[in-house]
Image (cartoon, coloured by chain):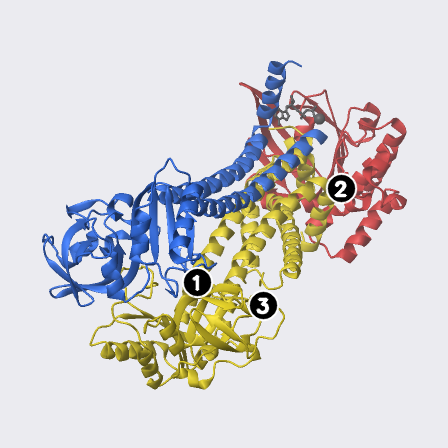
Chain colours: A blue, B red, C yellow
């Protein structure tokens, strides 16, 4: 039979039994729709999260104190193997390193006159605005100066500015954080959430001030941004060697953005497959439907 | 028992109306034996379905036991049918997946008879049609004559007062045919009212009343 | 028609169309089974978390330094605040009525070494109460001595994995280990126990809280964990804790108190929602099965026209015909559901024997819900075919004419 003939034969057969065909198609397409929708949702989530992660580029290496297998907690806990600001500053002088941002996070009350708010404090370096793509609504960001001898300056998140200085320009004003006085140099533009962290409710102060404020001996993390023409492995190897030379042995952990992405990608892919599998059950039932109808048609 | 008054029935075939029954009036008394003959398409089956409450007239009136049936609810007509009327068809209409016994039992099941009296009634009527030995056979294991006798057993298991047979011997050879005729005539002798549509002149002649239909009308009605 | 008669009538039809019936049962069964199986995954996760928490003792409060006013945001996890939460703060809480035990926790990472073997581990500084609150016990030796409440003793308790890494099969009790730049004597080894709330208790070092303060050169507590009396009013105690600390911190409320109940409730509600969503998605397959039943029923009606006509001729009413067809679907759904339930439970039994530690079990509502949806879908999609059967003109049906 020629293709055209057989196609028209099939369509005639389908048309002759259109209710049957329609219902079969309906069942099957609900299955397909379920599967497609769910896997699209999964894939969408994957893309979204990966995009969030790569928005600052993928040429980032995170350095945390302590050589521990506990992923992520290392920097937050106390450590007998501190990472210092001079470590961060020294890494900044390495070839191909474009920027270094030391990070010390904490919680404290930020006060301005009668108003106060408990919020997250990010102790960072002056390069943070460039590498994290933070935009300013007013003033400017923390200056890029000597990491170890920073001035008591602060940049407010957008929400925090509204809370503490409603309707006023806070630039040049003073706020108190944990008893110390900081001069406001800038206000961030509204940014929204990033991976569950609300940037609008943060305040940014120099890392050295943050260490004093929170009485910490060590940085929690140093984010290293490097030249995109150099591969992550090469860069990680260089930094590892450099740090071993400085500390005498490997008492730190390096995680490249590539590793983070690969892990994330794995988790999210599994999630996507699981969602697709969930939808596939309906498709399976739809398939059983087709078998049944075909079988009936054949025996008729 | 049966009183048809100016029954009309028109079927629409495409655009052209087809008058299957025209002003048919007919009285049938209890215990009568009627044969209905006539050319194909003359409305014999339509008349029989009308009497059997399977069909509704377009106009006219049908009194069954002096009850006007046209306006009755479907539910009520089904019950009248089940309790008073037995049907026999040319093509038997037995259900293939059921045994002879189960086929005969169906009307009793539909009316929720207790299982014990059901068994007894089925055994009785199967005995009456001479098929006690075939009770557990499926239709595909029975001959034409036997099939029709199972159908008769099913038709009478509810002890109806009226038996309607639409060409009951039409699919049978003459030997099986006369077996079947013998059975239904015996039922008639025992008091059941019998209306048989047939093409067979010999069979038609055996009835005590002969109706001839032509073009949806009763052409002659002789006793 | 009596129920038994109807069932046996329908059953005969199933026997007649064995393969078709089998496939329909499979469709319903797959749907029901997948709802049960998938919800039991969600429920299993919920029970797992539940069990983890209750292993901790169900009335635990956790005090974190710092406070965050971010609406709906995470609690302050960093543990770094301008004014430290101190050991003195912690011990003051012991005076609150209803508080049974207070375990101050200093947390950090250190290098633990024996000879040339060393390992970087999470190190917790605490006292005896820590064992009470976390329901921890030693497999060998003793827990931290009572004196560690105030004294910076040079003793430690090892997690089992840490012990194996450092000592192998050799005896560890009484031996000395290097912790950072100090030497400490091993007094106990924790009993074998898996992960607890994300912390691998097998790879951990426990030292006296004062020792940890010195080791990390910081008086700051990472957490305080409190065991409260079963009869105590948790909310009241939380308020009192805040009041006590605020007073000690010059009027500044700079801590966060979390109750284990509220954490558990949060987990519970997340996992329950997740389970419901999964159930709803799996139920789509039952919708598809319903459509399949409708399709087959419609075919069945047209194949059985003569039979329907005959039934009407022998006295069956439209209602009875409708019931017959609805009954057929209901019977299919019932049998399919039973098959699905059996299948699901045997798979659950199988997987439970593979992973005995995961409490795989469907939530109470799963079976009724799955069967309910199956029946709803089966019934809804049978209405049209049953109506079509009931509405057949007996005269035409007997002639086998297609309308
Ligand atoms: N349901 C129907 N639809 C259309 N035409 C019908 C229908 N039933 C019967 N007829 C027509 O009505 C006429 C009478 O039919 P019928 O009573 O079966 O004739 P007979 O049984 O005498 O051969 C025929 O012409 C037949 O084609
Ligand atoms: Mg005829």
Query: Is label 2 on the same chain as label 3?
Result: no
Q: Is mark 2 within 8 Å of ligand 2?
A: no
Q: Which residue is mark 3?
A: C164
N-terminal of the pair, mark 1 or mark 3, is: 3
Q: Quadrant of ligand 2?
A: top right
Res C382 quadrant in image? top right
Near-viewer residue (A152 or C43)? A152
In this rendering, does residue C4 appear at all? yes
Secondary structure, mark 1, is: helix
Say the numbered circle drawn on residue C144. Answer: none
Q: Are marks 1 and 3 in contact (CB under 8 Å)?
A: no
Q: Which residue is mark 2?
A: B155
Image point (16%, 47%), residue name: A140
Secondary structure, mark 2, is: helix
Q: CA distance from mark 1 to mark 3?
A: 34 Å
Quadrant where the C terminus of chain C lies?
Answer: top right
Near-viewer residue (C293 or B125)? C293
Q: CA distance from mark 2 to mark 3?
A: 89 Å
Residue C33: x %, y % from top left: 61, 52
Residue B197: x %, y % from top left: 75, 29
Image point (40%, 67%), residue name: C108
Answer left or right for A223 relative to B128. left
Q: Is mark 3 within 8 Å of ligand 1?
A: no
Q: CA distance from mark 1 to mark 2?
A: 69 Å
Say the numbered circle drawn on residue C267. Answer: 1
């Amino acid at each position: 039979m020629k293709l055209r003939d057989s196609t028209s034969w099939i369509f005639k057969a389908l048309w002759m039994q259109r209710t049957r065909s329609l219902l079969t198609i309906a069942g099957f397409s609900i299955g397909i729709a379920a599967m497609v929708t769910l896997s699209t949702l999964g894939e969408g989530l994957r893309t979204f999260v990966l995009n969030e992660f790569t928005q600052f580029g993928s040429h980032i290496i995170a350095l945390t104190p302590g050589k521990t297998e506990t992923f992520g907690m290392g920097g937050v806990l106390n450590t007998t193997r501190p990472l210092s600001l001079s470590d961060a500053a020294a890494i900044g002088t390495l070839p191909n390193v474009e920027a270094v941002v030391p990070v010390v996070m904490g919680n404290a009350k930020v006060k301005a006159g009668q108003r106060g708010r408990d919020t997250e404090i990010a102790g960072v370096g002056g390069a943070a605005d460039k590498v994290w793509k933070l935009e300013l609504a007013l003033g400017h960001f923390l200056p890029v100066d000597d990491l170890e001898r920073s001035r008591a300056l602060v940049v407010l998140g957008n929400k925090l500015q509204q809370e503490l200085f409603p309707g006023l320009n806070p630039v040049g004003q003073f706020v108190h954080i944990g008893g110390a006085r900081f001069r406001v140099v800038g206000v961030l533009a509204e940014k929204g959430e990033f991976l569950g962290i609300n940037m609008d409710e943060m305040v940014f102060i120099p890392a050295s001030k943050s260490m004093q404020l929170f009485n910490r001996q060590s940085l929690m993390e140093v984010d290293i941004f490097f030249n995109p023409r150099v591969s992550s492995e090469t860069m990680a190897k260089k930094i590892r060697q450099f740090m071993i030379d400085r500390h005498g042995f490997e008492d730190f952990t390096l995680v490249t953005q590539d590793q983070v992405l690969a892990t994330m990608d794995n988790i999210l892919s599994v999630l996507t497959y699981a969602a697709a599998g969930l939808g596939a059950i309906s498709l399976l039932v739809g398939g059983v439907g087709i078998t049944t109808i075909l079988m009936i048609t054949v025996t008729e | 028992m049966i009183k048809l008054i100016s029954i009309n029935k028109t079927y629409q075939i495409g655009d052209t109306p087809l008058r299957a029954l025209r002003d048919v009036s007919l009285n049938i008394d209890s215990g009568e034996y009627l044969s209905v003959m006539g050319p194909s398409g003359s409305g014999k089956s339509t008349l029989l379905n009308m009497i059997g409450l399977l069909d509704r007239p377009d106009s006219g009136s049908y009194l069954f036991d002096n009850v006007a049936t046209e306006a009755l609810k479907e539910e009520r007509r089904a019950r009248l049918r089940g309790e008073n009327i037995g049907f026999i068809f040319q093509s038997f209409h037995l259900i293939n997946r059921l045994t002879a016994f189960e086929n005969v039992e169906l009307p009793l099941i539909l009316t929720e008879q207790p299982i014990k009296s059901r068994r007894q009634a089925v055994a009785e009527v199967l005995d009456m049609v001479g098929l006690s030995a075939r009770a557990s056979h499926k239709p595909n294991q029975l001959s034409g004559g036997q099939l029709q006798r199972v159908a008769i057993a099913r038709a009478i298991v509810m002890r109806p007062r009226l038996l309607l047979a639409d060409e009951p011997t039409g699919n049978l050879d003459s030997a099986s045919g006369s077996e079947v005729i013998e059975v239904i005539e015996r039922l008639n002798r025992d008091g059941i009212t019998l209306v048989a549509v047939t093409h067979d002149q010999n069979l038609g002649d055996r009835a005590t009343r002969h109706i001839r239909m032509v073009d949806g009308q009763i052409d002659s009605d002789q006793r | 028609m009596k129920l038994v008669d109807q069932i046996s009538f329908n059953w005969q039809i199933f026997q007649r169309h064995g393969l078709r019936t089998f496939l329909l049962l499979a469709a319903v069964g797959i749907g029901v089974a997948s709802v049960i199986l998938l919800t039991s995954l969600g429920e299993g996760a919920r029970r797992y978390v539940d069990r983890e928490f209750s292993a901790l003792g169900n009335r635990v409060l956790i005090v974190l330094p710092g406070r965050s006013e971010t609406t709906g945001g995470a609690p302050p996890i960093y543990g770094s605040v301008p004014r430290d939460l101190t050991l003195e703060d912690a011990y003051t809480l012991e005076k609150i009525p209803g508080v049974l035990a207070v375990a101050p926790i200093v947390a950090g990472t250190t290098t633990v070494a024996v000879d040339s073997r060393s390992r970087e581990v999470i190190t917790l500084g605490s006292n005896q109460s820590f064992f009470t609150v976390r329901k921890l016990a030693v497999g060998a030796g003793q827990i931290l001595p009572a004196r560690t409440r105030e004294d910076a003793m040079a003793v430690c308790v090892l997690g089992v994995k840490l012990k194996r890494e450092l000592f192998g099969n050799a005896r560890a009790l009484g031996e000395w280990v290097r912790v950072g730049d100090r030497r400490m004597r091993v007094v106990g080894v924790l009993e074998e126990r898996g992960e607890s709330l994300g912390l691998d208790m097998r790879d951990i070092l426990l030292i006296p809280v004062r020792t940890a303060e010195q080791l990390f050169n910081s008086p700051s507590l990472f957490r305080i964990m409190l065991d409260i009396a079963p009869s105590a009013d948790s909310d009241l105690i939380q308020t009192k804790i805040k009041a006590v600390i605020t007073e000690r911190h010059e009027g500044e409320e700079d801590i966060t108190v979390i109750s284990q109940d509220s954490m558990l409730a949060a987990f519970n509600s997340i996992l329950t929602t997740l389970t419901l969503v999964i159930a709803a998605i799996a139920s789509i397959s039952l919708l598809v099965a319903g459509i399949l039943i409708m399709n087959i029923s419609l075919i069945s009606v047209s194949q059985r026209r003569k039979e329907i006509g005959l039934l009407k001729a022998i006295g069956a009413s439209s209602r009875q015909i409708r019931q017959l067809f609805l009954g057929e679907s209901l019977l299919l759904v019932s049998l399919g559901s039973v098959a699905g339930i059996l299948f699901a439970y045997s798979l659950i039994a199988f997987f439970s024997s593979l992973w005995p530690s995961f409490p795989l079990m469907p939530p109470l509502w799963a079976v009724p819900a799955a069967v309910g949806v199956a029946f709803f879908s089966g019934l809804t999609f049978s209405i049209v075919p049953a109506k079509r059967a009931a509405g057949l003109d007996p005269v035409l049906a007997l002639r086998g004419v297609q309308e």
